[in-house]
Amino acid sequence: MKSTMDALVFMRPGDYSIEKVPIPIESPGGFLLKVYACALCGSDLRTLRSGHRRITPPLVLGHEMAGIVERLGPQYHGPLKVGDNVAVSPPVYCGECEYCQDGRFELCENLVEMAQKWPGSFAEFVAIPEEAIPLSIRNLPQDMNLIHAAVSEPIAACVNAQEIGKINLGDTVAIIGAGPVGCIHSALAKLKGASKVIIADISPERLEISRGFFPDHTIDVNEKNIIEEVRELTDGKGAEVVITANPVPQTQIQAVEMCKKGGRILIFGGLPKNNNKPGIDMNIVHYNGLQIYGTTSFAPRHHELAIKLMYQYKIPVDRFVTIFKLSEFENGSRLALDGKITKAVFIPDEEFIERKSSLEKK
């Protein structure tokens, strides 16, 4: 086995590049993963641009990953075998705090993440720590599409959000944001029985891609007033559920103003720390009996369900994924940042690209 690998190394905001680094050594109770695919998250882009309070450079980034078990640590005693396909859930839970003990792992008081405490997966190999086993590791069917598995993390977070929001048969669901999260929410809402799904965005390219995720209506907010359009599509009543799938404060205000009396609002997208107090009219919340839910991360059961849904092709993630070699990171990340593509997935080993069709689910 060679001693070095290609990896995306983050040095400081605005300073990152593909470098040759030593292949990591797995911990005694962990394992070494040969990365098949690593997806680009919006938080990765923010870190590259502005840094992250939990990241101390230099560090290999990348936390949405799937791959093949390359080597087991000498003290690993779990069910995995060399050659198994796995997806790794980025959150690593303590399993001991009151929230973990209550099954609300997403609120773990001691939560840490891959590509923060440990090096990440924009690399040919990543060492999976013993702390991540077993709660953060999903053993996959050997015929599962590993590119799909790499985007299981945002799907799991959406599953959690919609569980909290209790989307019901017959609901109208309005989603503000047509990025990967908005697309996922659209497909999930339809699976849960929503009778009407509306997606709004400022990007015509993203709206076009979102049409592959079963919305009944799309709104280009460059051309139409989103609140007026949602009201018109709901006979003036508003949507039972509104999901803010974006980091823009104004959309949280709009969500309150387009929600039906007694409806639910899912605050899915976090806001910039210097602009995180939108001027919501709380009298609308009060007099219309609105329920506002903050949702973040997910528990292991949500990740399990996300894997099942993708394996059954209930969520057609191939419709929003664009594949790049890791050496093409600069181009892929730029296209994602500019909204020209929805979800960039990077494959570190170029041999995988050549034979991925034989590994993917047909």
Image (cartoon, helix red, strand yellow):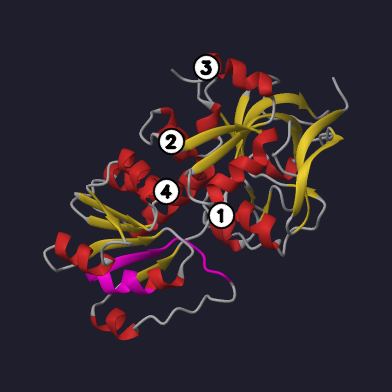
- Residue for badge 4: 159
Q: Residues within 10 Å of mark 1 (few under 14, many from 20)?
A: many
Between 90 and 223, the residue placed more toward the observer is 223
User: How much space separates mark 1 and mark 3, taking CA atoms?
Assistant: 35 Å
What quarter of the picture does the C terminus occupy?
Answer: top left
Residue 7 quadrant: top right
Residue range of the region highlighted in magenta in the rendering: 253-272
Q: Is residue 87 above or below residue 9?
A: above
Residue at image position (46%, 67%) is 248
Comparing 253 with 193, the one in front is: 253
Nearer-N-terminus badge (4/3): 4
**Residue at the spot x=68%, y=43% of the render?**
132
Residues under numbered marks 1 and 2 in contact, where contact means CB atoms less than 8 Å apart: no
Residue 357: numbered disc: 3
Residue 276 in view of the camera:
yes
Inter-mark Cα distance, 2 to 4: 15 Å
Q: Nearer the viewer, mark 4 or mark 3?
A: 3
Label disc, if present, on residue 317 of the rendered structure: 2
**Which mark's residue is nearer the viewer, 1 or 2?**
2
Provide residue 289's location: percent of width, then percent of height.
26, 77
